[in-house]
Image: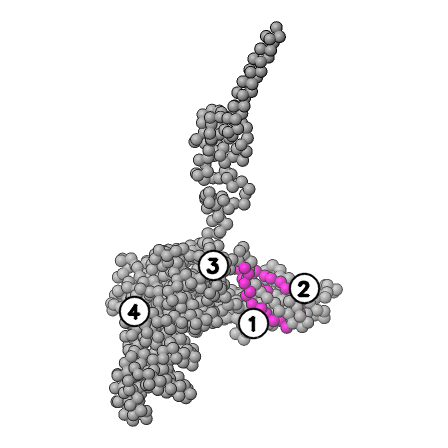
Amino acid sequence: SKLEKDSILSLWSEIRTDVPPILQIQLNLREPIIDMAWDISSDGQFILAIAFSRKISIYGERRATDVSDDLDKWINYVTFDVDTPDDITGIAWLDYGVLSVAAGNQLRCYIKWLTKEDRIQERMYPFFLIKVNFKSFNLIFLLLYIYIEPPFDPEFEPMSNIYDESYELNGPLPFYHPNLLIHYLMWGKIDLINAVLLSIYRFLRHIIDEVDIKVDQVPQLCISTILKLQNEAPDGLNKKNKGKQQHYSSLFEDSDEEDTTILLGIDDTDETRPLTRQETTFLIEQLDRRQLPGLSHEEKIHLLAMIDTFVEISIQRESLDENGARFTALVENFFHLNKALALEEQSNELAPRDTIWALHSQSQDLLLERCLRLCGGKLLWKDARAMGIFMWLKKSEVVIEQMTNIARNTYLNQEVKDPINCTLYYLALGKKGLLQSLWRTAHGHKEQGVMVRFLANDFSQPRWRTAASKNAFVLLGRQRYEYAAAFFLLGDKLSDAVGVILKNLKDYQLAIAICRVYEGDHSPLLQTILKTHVLPLAKETKDRWLMIMAYSLLEEPHECIRSIIVPLHDTCNETSEEQNHDNIVANVNDPNLFIMYQHLKEQLRLQNKQNLEISSRLEYAFSLNVSRAYERLGCPLLALFILSKCKKPVPEQEEEEKPIKESRAIDLFAEDDDLFKKKESKAIDLFAEEEDIFAPKKEQEDRAVDLFANDDIFADTKTSSTDLFGDDDWLNTTYSSIDHNEEEEQQQSNGDDEEITENNQV
């Protein structure tokens, strides 16, 4: 749309059958657009050139790095002025990436190549300019410097062009990129990850003596090997060939033979074997001091954390189920990455998209053991919230046990023992007597005497419950919110305590944990928290994973699946069941939702639940969006994997292949005038005219068919009067026979009278 001075350019996704277009981005260009031209590279990258009156801007797409991004990233590759006397009138892309610009009587052509002498590190890229003056027919070569932000290094790529820039910013990720490996890990492609790490190890082993820490290129893993390992059935992350189990045991074995193998360069021919302990240590040391192409410093740290993570889950691979292994990989990567990153770059907690796999795992005991080991064996509330423990633990007794550990560790972890910090946890557990004992030992605390006397009262009486509630309101006025929630619990006001935690502390995990410990998993207040706070929060923050977790806790599997596949504005709606959402599919940015969708669907099938109210067309559109999500993340092979292995049948094809089966009940509501016309069903074939099993031989007509004939059943026919099921009216036939006999008798009587008269006359 064009305004007086500004132009807003809207870029939409490609238009596909039965899939509505999606708005990718809107660009405010702040001046009118004169012309636009699209160019497509050989690897499918879109480049957009926009012409204004005096300048040219070139835009391209950037690879997505965060699955939470709703809009695609389109960035300005370059903007440069065109110093012509006249304004620009048009632009066009020519062959080999040449951009032609028409302005007045001049036609300028900008070619794509960059030279070795260009100051790439200073972000200055030139385009060679060819200026043609049609009046004097002079051909002038100019050099125009334009600013761009490339990831190039002139020592690695001395000859580069705009297509290289587009490929680096929006092309496929390197096969060793940590973001790609984590996606393969979620799909259970363990052998493929082993092949990648083994390939990097073998390459780095041969350059161990080189001083240069920069690696200009890494030999690519054979594409046929990647496709073969990618298309294999997943190991389930917990199943493996017995012949390969010995490799995992060798991860933690010290052997001189392994060291000799590294020194001598001896290696086996198995492309998918896991690395040994020595090989893993060597790989981490080499990657720590070298920089691989295509990886930033942060991504290299992420890769090192991924290698540590992969080694850890390989140890527990035999005892974890698929979802348990996924959660283990994510939580291990979370802790390893936080150790390597600076304090300001560390993540505070796992997202619901990471913790939900533990909720749907059958190996929660092992997962809890691993979580406790990662936090040093002393679980505090910040650790429990970071790993979402009270959101995914299923056993009530384990929930109470871990809350007891948190209360005890909170008290013992302090240099100066202060019972206030653990009051909320102990009162939620109903251990007022233990809390009173802690206050008796809190010598020197200014509130010791008051609390010891107050806790000695009987809070089963309404008087002291009211007193506890009044003190809670006083603490709210002093902004001591956690302590105020504890006094509400002391007064048996669970709903007020939860309200303070949700409103003031803004910690829904703590509210759910307190509610589960205080009233159990079947608490009505717990259902209220999930429905009135967690679900609206998930919808507001566009967090589908949090919505799935809430519906899982509410034991509503069908809503879990709907929250994955339908748009967010159609979820959390009481009247959603009455609406038809078959024509709307969600815009999926996180492809892991497809894995969760497959898992939930399989669980419903195993539980013999009723079929989903999700049409095949909607599932097919959903798989297309998942494939596109992988593509925008730089994982085209996984996008191909979705299309080739996990696709849904096209609805039109499905309807054509579906056999036509019609019944009498369906025919009654048909639009045709003839309700009983011939149909392709056995019931109707019994009465068909061509194959009438009740038809008499030769000239006799079908009695059963005649009952439903369109002809008048009371019409006169030549059928015998004794045929009660014929088309003729037997009553009319009988009367006509009687009348005929009477006429004959009358005629005979008249004849006799006439004969008598004649005789008399004679």
122 sits to left or right of 345: right
Q: Earlier in the sequence, mark 4 or mark 2?
A: 2
Residue at x 28% of width, y 68% of height: 365
Dot 2: element: strand
Q: Nearer the viewer, mark 4 or mark 2?
A: 4
- The numbered mark at residue 90 is 2
**Disc 1 crowd, CA 10 A, few/some/many (<14, 14-19, 20+):** some
- The numbered mark at residue 148 is 1
Q: Earlier in the sequence, mark 4 or mark 1?
A: 1
**Disc 4 crowd, CA 10 A, few/some/many (<14, 14-19, 20+):** few
As for residue 667 lying within the magenta part, the answer is no
Residue stretch rendered in magenta on the structure: 20-48
- The numbered mark at residue 421 is none
**Disc 2 crowd, CA 10 A, few/some/many (<14, 14-19, 20+):** some
Q: Position of residue 752 (x, y in %)?
A: 56, 13
Q: Nearer the viewer, mark 3 or mark 1?
A: 3
The quarter of the displayed image where residue 183 is located: bottom left
Q: Which residue type carries mark 1?
A: Ile
Q: Which residue is mark 3?
A: 622
The quarter of the displayed image where residue 443 is located: bottom left
Residue at x 51% of width, y 46% of height: 669
190 sits to left or right of 632: left
Q: Which residue type carries mark 3?
A: Phe
- The numbered mark at residue 395 is 4
The answer to whether the residue labelled 2 contacts the one labelled 1, judged by CB atoms less than 8 Å apart, is no
Q: Position of residue 663 (x, y in %)?
A: 45, 43
Q: CA distance from mark 3 to mark 1?
A: 36 Å
